[in-house]
Image (cartoon, helix red, strand yellow):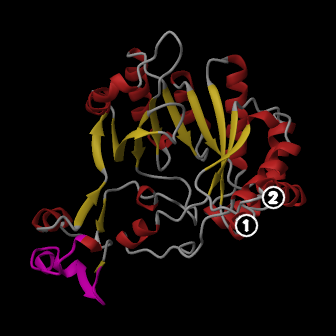
Amino acid sequence: MSETGMVLEIQRMSTEDGPGLRTSVFLKGCSLQCKWCHNPESISSKPDIQWRGHNCIGCRICMAGSAGRAFQFHDGKLIINRDMETDFATAVKDCPTGALEIIGQEWDAGSLVTEILKDKAYFTQTNSGTMGGVTISGGEPVLQSGFVVEIFQKLQAERIHVTLDTCGMYGKSKLESILPHVDLILFDIKEIDTRKHKEFTGSSNEAILENLKFINAYIRKNPQTRLWIRTPIIPHSTDTPENISGIAAFLRENDIHFDRWELCAFNNLCNDKYERLGMEWEYKNEGLLTDLFMDGLLARARADSSRPDRILWTGSVKKAFGDIFQEEKKNPIKAVNYCRITTVRT
């Protein structure tokens, strides 16, 4: 029988989860509880219910059914008691505007691969290389290792490039079962300091760093498998030069064989996800970082790394010194040089 797993979402035409144009499959269930999590709906391994306030017309039909006791309107918002055992599915079905939605659906691996293969024309491998592929993300996909292995095996039989996006927090046996079936690993190192990592994510980072060393040893023997490191740059959390220098030192001292290290700039586009789940997000008032700030962290990472040419920053940022650029339109070299000097000082 085919393995089954809990799937959150299938996202097509993605350009942010590995090389080329990709279909990304997000699984539910995570081993970390990051304060800044951009996919809070993926943390629980069970299906959940969310409320899209912009679709709601306040008809109260949801409160008339068997699930009505779990719903309460307050200041124009629907408050949901998600711990109550009730038939949320019926309330979702009865909602006339689609304001209520169940997130998370069980799939068997065979059916999921059939669905993914509808996109095959967009990421088939050619003689000149890979034109995209499929990424399994989360949550933490390794927690559903049997499901992931079967998906990867079936996709690789179709000559499709497969990527695992992982936070690194799990037992080695699950990781060991997946490694022979993956082409690329996207591995997060969020915070190098163990105490801060536990504060930010709910868990220490010892197992994560050990798993990275385990992956590195595997890649040394199996160089066809590639590794990208990714670090989320979160305001007032992971965005310190000390954290970036510490990660660079760990990668250098353990001779981690990465092809790419991305510093991923923070964004607050997930704020509405927290609202739909009735959750508060402590980063909701944080804005975009500046390009100059990211340049400064990048300079620090490259200065402390043995592979500086493989490090970059990604994501949306705001321009630093916008007023200066406006004033210096007639003398752009002066403005650029000013930013270069400030970047070096950073």
Residue 64 within the magenta-colored segment of the rendering: yes
Secondary structure beneath label 2: helix
Q: Is residue 3 above or below residue 242?
A: above
Residue 231 within the magenta-colored segment of the rendering: no
Stretch of the chain drawn in magenta? 55-78
Determine crowd level at label 1: few under 14, some 14-19, many 20+ residues with C-alpha closer than 10 A: some
Residue that sits furthest to the top in the current view? 127
State if disc 2 and disc 1 touch (CB < 8 Å): yes
Mark sitting earlier along the chain (1/2): 1
Residue 148 placement: quadrant: top left
Between residue 294 and residue 90, name the one nearer to us.
294
Asked if residue 26 shows in the view, the reply is: yes
Residue drawn at point x = 79 percent, y = 54 percent:
336
Percent across and percent down for residue 245 are 84, 51
Secondary structure beneath label 1: loop
Residue placed under numbered mark 1 in the picture: 321
Q: Is residue 239 above or below residue 217?
A: below
121 relative position to 66: left or right:
right
